[in-house]
Image (spheres, rainbow, N blue to C red):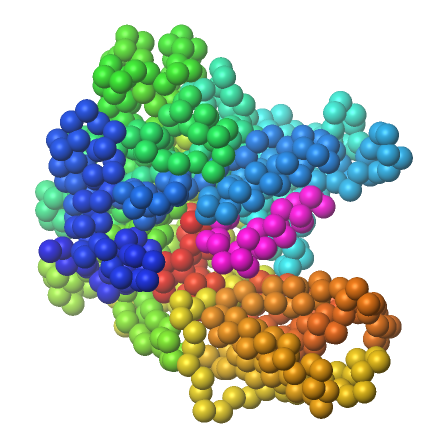
Amino acid sequence: MTRFAAPIAEQIWDMKYRLKAQDGTAIDGSVEDTWRRIARAMAAVEKDPAHWEAKFYHALEDFKYLPAGRITAGAGTGRAVTLFNCFVMGTIPDNMGGIFDGLKEAALTMQQGGGIGYDFSTIRPRGAEVKGVAADASGPLSFMDVWDAMCRTIMSAGSRRGAMMATMRCDHPDIEAFIEAKKDPARLRMFNLSVLVTDPFMAAVKADGPWELVFDGKVYRTLQARDLWNKIMRNTFDFAEPGVIFIDRINAMNNLSYCETIAATNPCGEQPLPPYGACLLGSINLAALVTNAFAANAALDLSALDDLVRTAVRMMDNVVDASRFPLPQQEAEAQAKRRIGLGVTGLADALLMIGARYGSEEAAAITERWMHAIARSSYLASVDLAREKGAFPLFDADKYLASGALAEMDADVRDAIRQHGIRNALLTSIAPTGTISLYAGNVSSGIEPVFAYAYTRKVLQKDGSRTEEEVVDYAVRLWREKFGDAPLPDHFVNAQTLPPLDHVRMQAAAQKWVDSSISKTINCPEDISFDDFQQVYMAAWDQGCKGCTTYRPNDVTGSVLTVSETSDKTPSEAPAAQQDGEVIYLSEPLDRPAALEGATYKLKWPGSEHALYITVNDIIISGHRRPFEVFINSKNMEHFAWTVALTRMVSAVFRRGGDISFVVEELKAVFDPRGGAWMEGKYIPSILAAIGGVIERHLIEIGFIEGEGMGLKSDPQAEVVAIGATPRGKSCSSCGSYDMRMVEGCMTCASCGYSKCG
């Protein structure tokens, strides 16, 4: 039986990927059972299932090939789930009916856990005329607020969180408002934002020329391109958003430029997709393919890599046929193009194991060679599949081979495509692999550098206490096993010590042989100058990247992981800091301590002889206060039954943890048909709404949500603050720890593996 490399790996498998019955009984007895389940499901569509099940199992064995989390968790379960991670939704029409049809499609997709991407450039700007109704348009950001609320509502209902990406063209008249939207920390919290930057805009920036903001052929305003660029840079510098997507480059380099136009990406940016495009992901674990690690003859086994890639491509192609889809349009799009996104993880560890310094020119050249080998094997495997099963339905040899992405592909590969066709229109992509990298033994994530060689993980227990364990990077663990306490060599660099331009060099080297895109975060030091920060984006543009995402510690998003004091010393110690995240979710209710702190509020409802007394008690977990239970008392016996029922129900919700502010929203939305009452200058529609306002006031006072008092808007994702201390940033919405870090454009928890993007 496979031995997990670390407790965190086994815990993630058990929590996220292990098949269990509804009552929690384990069906997958071991990780081998999980691999067998996946292999059997992927082989079921083959003519010889037994042969391919064995091949697929061998690829999965020992974490060599890592399907994305949806496949690992859902394949072979018999459940009505999608195996695709993310989707770009349909083009939003510029009319009210079409906009809300799009909202409905987004809700149905997110209900199944799919992340979504949307381009909001198609909605007319704020203040534009709406013909026929004598009104002005409210603009795309107002509708983004509606999408944001929808996502929050679905999350409140208990569904798995799905991330959202919003894009807007750099020439849209509302682009400046879009760029600055995240200045308000309570707004658009469910979205990642990225600006679609065009080639003419970049030319205008470099020439310091004018730039027109246009919609539907009408020029709304002209400004200097460099001023707009500086506004993007300043907001990204201060708030870590928006990202930048070089959209013209993406379309020019798209294998399918002859039959689709891309205007959006999935939430983490590694898959630029057309309307209703679906994101199917998997990763080759490069660290598992290195032979003779740390020796003079250490090398990546290229023969094993070729065999593994060919098997992985076949498995992923089968997912297209095996998966369900939230919408029929998504299924039609996937079947027509059979797009897959095979990527890598463990790149940084593999480089460490062969003696190369991540970010160096040598490492970039090695990365380019490895990615070329993967691309070549992928395309040849897909050609073989086309010979056996047929090319993707929209294949046109002349148009396909004319795309920019295939210009540098090997001549024999191009000849094979022309002669036999190809099964999958696009094949390579590098996705965030935070959770599956931990599951595979804490290998380095995607093409990112090692984040920290070791760190202390705090594990939340049912009683609110925490235990600690050290989590060690895969390559560092191998070094310790081989050399004991010997110091790490100088080529061991990590994300804390790496210059930003070294990040860019690695992204550009990988991008050359990736036909989709790459999810990567360029970590920048907090004290980087604004001019140097801007140069990171210019370098990404000049070196051929398709987009750029940076992360600089700041007051809004917090900082990065605290490195364990017991970790191996790095060439330059990483500073301790705080993290981003949200509220604590618990799989089982907390036990009640013997004593709790709380507050009692008196509520006098007009027309009622006796007041209601509402007590809200709180529990303190690791210094953080959150509501635990509610009691409502009154001398008026008319209220007895429903107040007891209400307090039991609300208390049960509070004890489960997570986003409980929807309780306030639901109570405040209750209208009494007999009429409400005026209280403190506000109309309160019912006594239940008044109770909701009291609970809201309490949540604000303890710092659980943001706001100024009863009746005002609250933010259900506001940060939890320590009593008697300044805010610590934001906690993980899965385990409550402050171990969030930016990985590949996505906030990821180092304690439990939760990722905002999947």
Q: Main secondary structure of the magenta part?
A: helix
**Horizontal side, residue 379 vs residue 660: left or right:** left
Instruction: Let me know if residue 143 is in the magenta part.
Output: yes
The image position of residue 267, as x and y in percent, is 50, 43
The vertical placement of 286 against 704, above or below, is above
Viewer-proximal residue among 526 and 664: 664
The vertical placement of 702 against 107, above or below, is below
**Horizontal side, residue 561 vs residue 15: left or right:** right
Residue 367 appears in view: yes
Q: How many marks?
A: 0
The residue located at (18%, 50%) in the rendering is 33
Q: If the image is split into quadrants, where does the N terminus sit? A: bottom left
The image position of residue 294, as x and y in percent, is 14, 50
The residue located at (58%, 62%) in the rendering is 717
The image position of residue 463, as x and y in percent, is 38, 80
**Horizontal side, residue 727 vs residue 387: left or right:** right
The vertical placement of 278 against 352, above or below, is above
Residue 59 appears in view: no
**Horizontal side, residue 347 vs residue 705: left or right:** left
The residue located at (60%, 80%) in the rendering is 644
Q: Specify the quadrant of the image occupied by residue 15.
A: bottom left
Instruction: Let me know if residue 554 is in the magenta part.
Output: no
The residue located at (27%, 11%) in the rendering is 420
Viewer-proximal residue among 498 and 60: 60
The image position of residue 26, as x and y in percent, is 25, 59
Magenta residues, as a range?
Answer: 141-163
